[in-house]
Amino acid sequence: MIKQELEVLKSKGQLRSIPNIEAKSDGKIVIDGKEYINFASNDYLGLSTKDDLRKEFLKNNNSLLSTASARLLTGSSPEYKELERTVAGIFNKEAALIFNTGYQCNLGVIYALIGRGDVIFSDKLNHASIIDGMQLAQGDFYRYKHFDYDNLEKLLESKRGQYKRALIVSESVFSMDGDIADIDRLVELKKKYNCMLMIDEAHAFCAVGDTLAGVSYGKDVDIITATFGKAVGSFGAFCVSSNDIISYLINKARSFIFSTSIPPLNIAWSNWILTEKRNIVIAQKEKLQELTSEVHKLLDRKGIKTPSGTQIIPIIIGSNDATLAISEKLRSEGYYIPAIRPPTVPEGTSRLRISLTADCKFEDFSQLVDLIS
Ligand code: PMP
């Protein structure tokens, strides 16, 4: 039975396997002994592979490698409190709560906030962690067409009144399209229909926007989630919100309550990057934003259309097989850009997801475009 299902996935071009990655540094990746230009990383500022940074940090830090418990028992430590203070400050929110991953964070927050008799309105292209959170939560959910806020308003008009608490959820920068949600419109709708608004800034935190706080900074967003595993070059995730909501999550978010917290060493690394090394974060973010702007100008000149306004640039091919073939061809030319297929993206929209990092070179991107176009 399982064998057959694997065969079906294979025949549909949807069978996945873990690549044999041997090394990563400075915008390059080594797989099966061969080096490629890495256009597939979420390490948007290139911080996770900077040897000098890591050595400097480890020279002066002796934090523990295990908490051996969930936060509510013996798994907390001063490193946690410091990092929570740092991120609450960056987002200018009352409080923060660290989760083990962005996946667990979205799952736990949605599950905690939405019970029986409550409702969620979610952008159709929201990340799997949001979808899974909605499926786990005891309330109902409705998915509005991607970025179609008129469609969202129609749903709010007809459904909102039937429920107690309501939550609108969207990513800010969408992970597979690189397009940016209209946060002002979402704020307007959440106010008009008495909902809470939750924005996932995973791909914008420290990468997109004028501050480090992503694209919704300064707007009336109730709950913001984001991860340390992308631009911060670390691991873990967090939610920032009001004191009340954070206290509520501490009491209700099962993925927070029932899981051993991540090692203090890792928490200290995230905090060190965001405080002691904030100048490097800002410099790398500016480098990334300059590269992103040059890349979009090039795409415009070449007449290549993309929904993206950010460092995530999808080239939508359509079928799985064609996407895999182009990905393989690019690999033979020295570029690593995996084929992104369903269920990560909707059926028929398989794509190459190019992600730029501060370590990518414009010339490499330009040559890549010549190969694709
Ligand atoms: N939200 C979004 C939008 C994501 O793209 C991801 C990861 N790709 C997550 C949440 C999950 O974050 P993490 O990898 O820390 O679990």
Image (cartoon, rainbow, N blue to C red):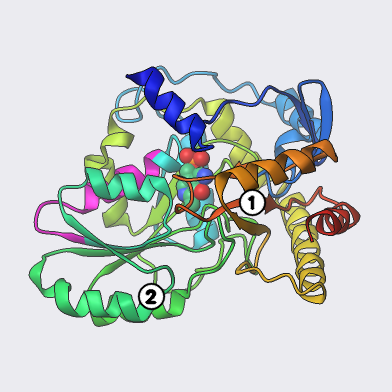
Q: Position of residue 280 (x, y in %)?
A: 77, 50
Q: Is residue 100 left or right of residue 169?
A: right
Magenta region, main secondary structure? helix
Depth check, front residue: 193 or 364? 364
Disc 2 residue: CB within 8 Å of ligand 1: no
Classify residue 309 by image quadrant: bottom right
Depth check, front residue: 186 or 274? 186
Characterize the local packing of mark 2: few (<14), some (14-19) or many (20 or more) Cα atoms within 10 angstroms.
many
Q: Is residue 232 visible?
A: no
Characterize the local packing of mark 1: few (<14), some (14-19) or many (20 or more) Cα atoms within 10 angstroms.
many
Q: How many marks?
A: 2
Q: Position of residue 328 (x, y in %)?
A: 73, 38
Does residue 31 lie above or below 302 as drawn? Answer: above
SS for dot 1: strand
Residue contact between numbered discs 1 and 2, judged by CB atoms under 8 Å: no
At label 2, the amino acid type is Leu
Quadrant location, the N terminus: top left
At label 1, the amino acid type is Arg
SS for dot 2: helix
View extreme (front): residue: 11
Q: Earlier in the sequence, mark 1 or mark 2?
A: 2
Quadrant location, the C terminus: bottom right
Q: Any magenta on residue 110?
A: yes
**Residue visible at 73% across and 70% down?**
304
Residue placed under numbered mark 1 in the picture? 353
Classify residue 63 by image quadrant: top right
**Residue visible at 27% across and 41% down?**
253
Does residue 86 lie above or below 65 as drawn? Answer: below
Residue placed under numbered mark 2 in the picture? 186
Magenta-colored span: 104-119
**Residue visible at 40% across and 29% down?**
76
